[in-house]
Amino acid sequence: MPEHRMEPRNQGYAKTIMDSRPGYLRNLTEEGCKIVTVSALPYSINEILTFQILPDETSGLDRITVTAELRWEKKDGPYFIYGFLISNFASEKDRKIYFKLVTQYSRA
């Protein structure tokens, strides 16, 4: 099907893996992020979790490991939305990649 958009679509979804549970990264800020899943996560508010972020393949960025506090959760139709406050990155390289993602998505 031919593309009829006036402006190019910004590609990209970052995926997440949390204890083998997939999700999608949304609404990144320097302090935190939202993760959307299709099934409930078995974690409690204020629990500290470590998960991986897998940037879109087209970004050329490596997967990173983040430690964050689960601050809130909300059910929205068939989806579960979780808010996280980032507390640490596995490495300085991971921190730099995360901030590249924040910049990339803020332009989207």
Image (cartoon, grey):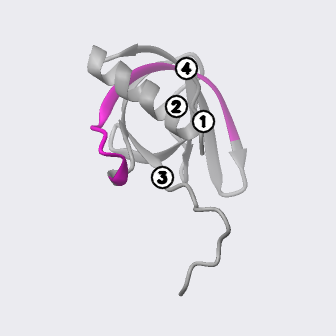
Q: x, y percentage for residue 80? A: 62, 45
The residue indicated by pointer 3 is 12
Q: x, y percentage for residue 46? A: 57, 16
Amino acid type at circle 4 is Glu
The residue indicated by pointer 2 is 103
**Can the viewer see residue 84?**
no
Circle 3: is it few (<14), some (14-19), or many (20+) Cα within 10 Å?
some
Mark 3 → mark 2, Cα distance in angstroms: 13 Å
Q: Which mark is residue 106?
A: 1
Q: Which mark is residue 30?
A: 4
Q: Nearer the viewer, residue 59 or 6?
A: 6
> Which quarter shows the C terminus?
top right
Say which element carries label 4: loop
Q: Main secondary structure of the magenta part?
A: strand
Check the image and name the residue furthest to the bottom. Answer: 1
Q: Earlier in the sequence, mark 3 or mark 2?
A: 3
Task: Say if 68 sits above or below 63 in the image.
Answer: above
Q: Is residue 103 magenta?
A: no
Q: x, y percentage for residue 65? A: 32, 27
Circle 1: is it few (<14), some (14-19), or many (20+) Cα within 10 Å?
few
Q: Earlier in the sequence, mark 3 or mark 4?
A: 3
Instruction: Give the magenta range.
Output: 58-74
**Can the viewer see residue 49?**
yes
| Image marks 3 and 2: residues in contact by CB distance under 8 Å | no
Q: Earlier in the sequence, mark 3 or mark 1?
A: 3
Q: Earlier in the sequence, mark 4 or mark 1?
A: 4
Amino acid type at circle 2 is Thr
